Image: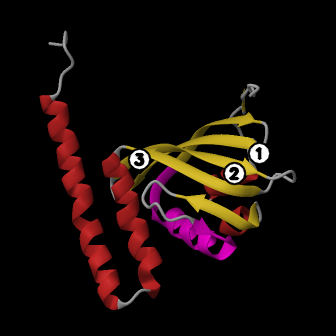
Amino acid sequence: MSAVEATRVEAGAGQGHPFRRAMERRDLPALVATLRPDVVFNSPVTSRSFVGLEEVTAVIRVIMDSFEKLEYPDEWVAGSTHIVTFQGQMSGRYVEGCELLRCDEEGRVARIEISARPIAGVMAVASAVGPGLARDLSWFRWACLRLVTKYVPALLHAMDRAAQLVWKPRGWR
C-alpha cells in the first residue's frame, strides 16, 4: 500500500471543501448540493448508517439547528478524502471532532464518517438530534428516546468531572 500525503487547507473565506463552507454558513441547500444521492452518513452516536440524500439531509438539518456554536478550524486533503475538524457547543456542552469526507471523482461527498469527543458532548449531540429525528416515531418510542437522552448526558458529564478529580498519572502531584 502506498502512502498518500495530506495537504493542509489554509483557513479563510472561500477555502476548503464546499461541504465545510456550507456548514460554517449553516446553508442547508448549499450543503445538500455537495452530496451524492446515495451518500452514507456514519455517526458516533449510533451504529446505524443513514443512507441516501433524504435521510442524511434530515440528520444534518437537525445538527445545524442544534449547534449553538460551531466552527471548523482545520482541514486536510489526501487524495479524494477531506479531513475536517470541528468544535462547538450543543445543549451547553463542548464537543469537538473530525469529519472524514470521502468524495467521488466530481468532488461530491459519497461518505461522511464522524468521530467526536468527549462522550458527554457526544451524548449532548444525541440528546439534541435524536428527538428531532424521532418525530415520525410512535409517541412511546419518542418518549423513551427523549427520557434516555435527557439524563444520560448529565450523568456522563458528572462521571467525566469525577474522573478528573480522582485520576492522576504516576509522577503527577
Task: Pick the quarter of the image with the C terminus.
Answer: top left
> Of helix, strand and loop, which one carries label 1?
loop
List x then y, in percent, for residue 43: 50, 57
List x then y, in percent, for residue 71: 55, 46
Q: Residues within 10 Å of mark 1 (few under 14, many from 20)?
A: few
Task: Examine the image and state in which quarter residue 151 appears.
Answer: bottom left
Q: Is residue 160 above or below residue 123?
A: above
Magenta segment boundaries in residue numbering: 50-70
Kind of residue at badge 2: Arg
Residue for point 51% across, 63% down? 63
Q: Nearer the viewer, residue 126 or 3?
A: 3
Q: Is residue 27 left or right of residue 70?
A: right
Question: Residue at label 1?
Answer: 14
Question: Residue at label 2?
Answer: 21
List x then y, in percent, for residue 37: 75, 70
Q: Would you say the residues marked 3 and 2 are in contact, meaning their CB atoms lie under 8 Å apart?
A: no
Kind of residue at badge 3: Val
